[in-house]
Image: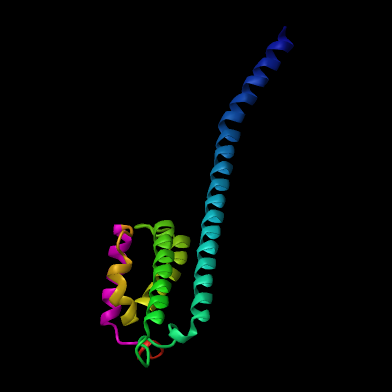
Amino acid sequence: MLLHMTTMEWLEALSYLVTIIALPFGIWVFMKEQQKERLNDDEELYLQLSDDYSKFLRLVLENADLRLMTQSEPASPFNPEQVERRDILFEILISIFERAYILVYEEKMNRQTARLWQTWEDYMRYWCRRRDFRSILPSLLEGEDPDFQRHINAIAGKEALTPKNPSASA
């Protein structure tokens, strides 16, 4: 009987030890795994959005006659077909920007999210330097997320006042 009591006491002490040490450790491991999974999800999302932007740039290349990467204004006026292609490309771009805004942007970002977002902010600034992009921005933003509209309009307003980048000027 004494041996049985000692074994019971030993098992009870072991269960306390598990509760005091192993349970918090298990919670810590679970939280670290969740954090790692969130970082992986963020990276995967960023790669997917980057892939969409790369596809957009391929479309820009296929429409090189529009000179969207080298001139902010065409050397001569676009014909109606060129205007339509340019406007469609801008619509695709706005769609990518809105998706990036909704999926990545946060008011208070951790370091990793801020790093990922900064790339998108740079892309938006680049395109908002274009006068033709800014001029049709209101129509491009119809029906888009209101927070995104405010965000990109603020960028466009700042970029309209910024001295032109030599590669983006007419």
Residue 17 placed where, x, y %?
61, 29
Toward which corner of the image does residue 28 lie, by quadrant? Answer: top right
Q: What residue lies at 62% left-to-right and 24% top-to-bottom?
A: 15
Q: What residue lies at 38% left-to-right and 57% top-to-bottom?
A: 106
Q: Nearer the viewer, residue 12 or 141?
A: 141
For this orientation, the residue located farthest to the front is 80
Q: Is residue 129 above or below residue 167?
A: above
Residue 48 placed where, x, y %?
54, 62
Q: Nearer the viewer, residue 80 or 27?
A: 80
Q: Nearer the viewer, residue 112 or 72?
A: 72
Q: Quadrant of the C terminus?
A: bottom left
Residue 140 placed where, x, y %?
33, 68
Per the picture, the main secondary structure of the magenta-coloured stretch is helix
In the rendered image, residue 26 lying in the magenta stretch gets the answer no
In the rendered image, residue 154 lying in the magenta stretch gets the answer yes
Q: Count how many numbered circles sit on residues in the image.
A: 0
Q: Quadrant of the N terminus?
A: top right
Q: Viewed as shown, does residue 154 lie left or right of 94?
A: left
Q: Is residue 161 above or below residue 142?
A: below
Q: Nearer the viewer, residue 114 or 68?
A: 68
What's drawn in magenta, residue-wise?
Answer: 146-164
Q: How is the image coloured?
A: rainbow
Q: Viewed as shown, does residue 39 lie left or right of 66?
A: right
